[in-house]
Image (cartoon, coloured by chain):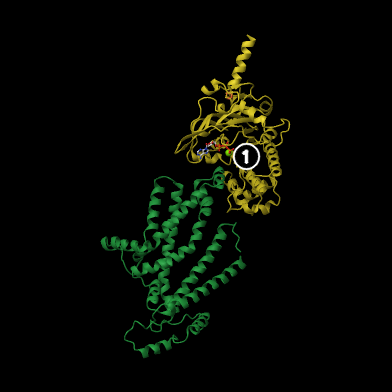
Chain colours: A yellow, B green
Amino acid sequence: MSDQENYMLKINNLRTSFFTPVGEVKALNNVTFAMKEGDVLGIVGESGSGKSVTSYSLLGLLAYPGKIVGGTIRFNGHEIEKKTEAEMRKIRGDEVSIIFQDPMTSLNPVYTVGNQIVEVIRLHTDKDAAAAQARAKELLELVGINEAEKRLKQYPHELSGGMRQRVMIAIALACEPKLLIADEPTTALDVTIQAQILELMIELKNKLGMSIIMITHDLGIVSNMCEKIAVMYAGKILEYGTVDEIFYTPRHEYTKGLLRSIPNLMDREHKKLVPIEGTPVDMLKPPKGCPFAPRCESCMRICLEHMPEVVHFSDTHYSACWLNQKDEWTKESVEA
Amino acid sequence: MGKYILKRIAMGLTTIFIVITLTFFLMNLIPGGPFMAEKAISAQAQAAMNEKYGLDKPLPVQYKNYLVNLTKGDLGVSVKQRGRDINGIITSKFPVSARLGGASILMALIVGIPLGSIAAINRGKLADNIIIVIATFGIAVPSFVLCTLLMYIFGVKLNLFPTYGLGSLKHYVLPVFALAFYPTAYIARLMRSSMLDVLGQDYIRTAKAKGLSTFVLLFKHALRNAILPVVTYLGPLLAYTLTGSFVVEKIFTIPGLGSEFIGSISGRDYPLIMGTTIFLATLIVTMNVLVDIAYKLIDPRIKLQ
Ligand SMILES: Nc1ncnc2c1ncn2[C@@H]1O[C@H](COP(=O)(O)OP(=O)(O)OP(=O)(O)O)[C@@H](O)[C@H]1O
Ligand code: SF4
Ligand SMILES: [Mg+2]
């Protein structure tokens, strides 16, 4: 954590809430992580853990009752949380883009594919109509769509799901973003198409040198694609580390639970997160102790009373679990 | 597309043919006849009149004769207006109704669509609540009540607008308002719910993630999708406006086709009943074909078959 300037994205104690009629839903509770240029970060966690809300906060895309209530987001020199809507518009689609989960519904049905790609190019660059059109064609070829000229004139409903997701990727890449957020980009697609899309993303990342945040339920995807993993639960990042650190020396009971649900660690092919027993946390009333406590087999009294502190195991590996501190404590007493 | 239109025209003609047949036989079922009320006419004269207009022949023969004339574009001659031909009555009276109805439809669209959109964009806020109240009022109040209310307040009490005829632009205000109020309210409600639905769609989020301005978001991405239910409503809207104009023309003493139509029924002016009915039915059938084509132009997913 030496050179602060090196980070292209640094999120600190981000808190986001939804102010609903029944109360404040605390969707993010002090989310903290950082990324360097060219990093591929995987965010894993069960449904409702706050993965999408994290990316929407970063892009200023939170829907109405949602608001950032605390923390800082530094991205590429911008103080995101202080930006006005007009300033955010310049960043969205240009410096950061996002690919959404469902390609079937993410394109506007009444405009051609070409129209929807050209639109974002013309918005963020000074290319004229013809140049933007040429760029759109180039992008379709880049994402592996053949007969690009013809596809540009087609409507979304005339394309398959995999093809549409490629179009979404083309839109996201149109202005060569520094950061690409992929929010479960392949969940809606079948396995072969999934693999193709992911391969494409890695290839493009290497070609264009962008950073990627890969949000997924699929530990297989994470282990294949990502360098770092953030494990999210109840609006918190419980553990963060490199792929090897997370897979071979997990330091949080929740992470261990996730990994136990994979029969063979070496077989990293598409392992979906199997739900751990117990119900998720009520985000209206987050517990004062460890959020995972009600479902944790190793839960101790202190876990219910106090929030575990973040403990660093290496430059890249940290987690928040009372067991870590117990280890430290035991080690110290043994050494003494 | 061309094939579809031909098919729709054939279907439309069939519909109109059914309307003609039903109207023809049903109107002859209504007791009375064109010359009944005129007491002064002797039985002999009545018979002569009936013979002159072909009303003495058996119904099937009258029906056949009517159809034959119709294929020549001849709607016949009014039996009450001393020989005026129906084509002439329609061409002279319809423009009046068309101006009134056209202005009303235009107002309903120009006011209703933005109102509904504004309500949706400001969901739950003051503007939304005000628009909902107005729209609910507009849908609940019958047009004849509204007509009399408008006439009383703005015509009689405040003396701002004339209450009869269509002499000047000012004459249009009250009748157009009376005729357009319900559809405006209806369109506002329709537009609100469809806009709310569209604004929650994933592709709107995609558009937003591109960094597009709110203006482009609304007018390019949302409106074209959200307007589809309103386009569908254009058919019923025309039918509503036509029937509504019967009432409004009557109350505001406007010499349009609506007044003729009502007059023709109470006077048993058979050819005029037939003529106006056929004309209005054709109008509505045409509108429905146009709506389908518009729908196809707006939404490329629609296949016209
Ligand atoms: N519009 C909203 N109103 C209220 N609460 C919301 C809203 N959107 C999200 N939340 C809250 O934020 C939490 C996190 O949601 P988020 O969509 O980020 O989950 P996720 O990790 O992306 O899940 P999934 O894997 O299902 O996409 C949810 O548990 C929910 O309580
Ligand atoms: S802090 Fe306690 S409850 Fe939470 S994961 Fe660790 S052991 Fe389990
Ligand atoms: Mg999500």
Is A242 placed above or below B58 here? above
In front: B208, or A243?
A243
From the image, which quarter does the C terminus of chain A lie in? top right
In front: B136, or A81?
B136
Query: Type of residue at label 1?
Result: Glu
The answer, for residue A128, to whether it is visible in the render is no
Q: Position of residue B292 (x, y in %)?
A: 55, 63
Could you tell me which chain the residue with mark 1 belongs to? Answer: A
Respond yes or no on whether mark 1 lies under 8 Å from ligand 3.
Answer: yes
In front: A319, or A263?
A263
The residue lying furthest to the top in this view is A336
Q: Position of residue A144 (x, y in %)?
A: 70, 46
Q: Position of residue B145 (x, y in %)?
A: 33, 62
From the image, which quarter does the N terminus of chain A lie in? top right
In front: A306, or B201?
A306
Residue B155's image quarter? Answer: bottom left
Q: In which quarter of the image is ligand 1?
A: top right
Look at mark 1 in the image and give the residue it sits on.
A184
Please tell me whether mark 1 sits on a helix, a strand or a loop.
loop
